[in-house]
Image: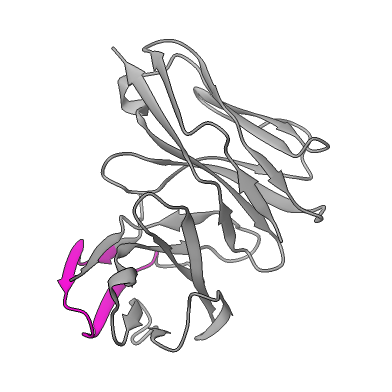
Amino acid sequence: AQTVTQSQPEMSVQEAETVTLSCTYDTSENNYYLFWYKQPPSRQMILVIRQEAYKQQNATENRFSVNFQKAAKSFSLKISDSQLGDTAMYFCAFMDNSNYQLIWGAGTKLIIKP
Amino acid sequence: EPEVTQTPSHQVTQMGQEVILRCVPISNHLYFYWYRQILGQKVEFLVSFYNNEISEKSEIFDDQFSVERPDGSNFTLKIRSTKLEDSAMYFCASRGPGGRYEQYFGPGTRLTVT
């Protein structure tokens, strides 16, 4: 069974700094998808960024980028120039292309300090 | 931008009562999901639905749960006889046709069973 591990329960950085959130996963599949979702205090689940496992190029969305290391089964999220509005829980999630269920990590609480 | 909507935002019910949680997925999406998040715990997959039938369901999705797409727009989750441990945030998600794999989430319904 696939598992997703986020080893950092909580992180805090100063506004404008860069922060990296870690995620590792375990799977025997070769084709799958990885996601980072943001959950602010409103508890809405917002898709931040996605990565297809067959793509070697790391995904980037504005200030958000990933470091996808397929052999190491690692999928970290880098937030550049962090803003107060980035304060939220961040969840890493895995999806294989057989059933399209999302398997979730436990989350990292990110606090951006002014 | 189209979005998934859920009603109610918060439902309080007594143990043993039936509840129906409602979702309106994005209009051209074909795949629908329910997840739940017990406070402080991981998000868990409940069920996926496609072409008017359940595609996959988890061990959590036992006989007290059911899903329905009654009118081509709404997607509902019914819990027949609620238990205290059903208290959680329930998220609906939908996914587009073809090769689209991203799931878009509604704002969630907070269910409190007393």
The answer to whether B1 appears left or right of B56 in the picture is left
* Image location (x, y in percent) of residue B45: 51, 65
Q: Is residue B22 magenta?
A: yes
Q: Which residues are magenta?
A: B6-26
Q: Quadrant of residue A24?
A: top right
Q: Residue at x 29, y 86 (%)?
A: B81
Residue for point 35% across, 58% down: B106
In the rendering, at what x and y percent does residue B27 appear? 40, 67
- The answer to which of A22 and B108 lies nearer the viewer is A22
Quarter placement of the C terminus of chain B = bottom left
Residue at 66% across / 52% down in the picture? Answer: A3
A92 in relation to B18, above or below:
above
Q: Position of residue A52 (x, y in %)?
A: 70, 45
Examine the rendered structure and indicate whether residue A98 appears above or below residue B59.
Answer: above
Q: How many marks?
A: 0
Chosen colour scheme: one colour
**Residue B32 among magenta residues:** no
In the visual, does B102 lie left or right of A43?
right
Image location (x, y in percent) of residue B24: 33, 69
Relative to residue A75, is residue B56 depicted above or below? below
Between B97 and A98, the one nearer to me in the picture: A98
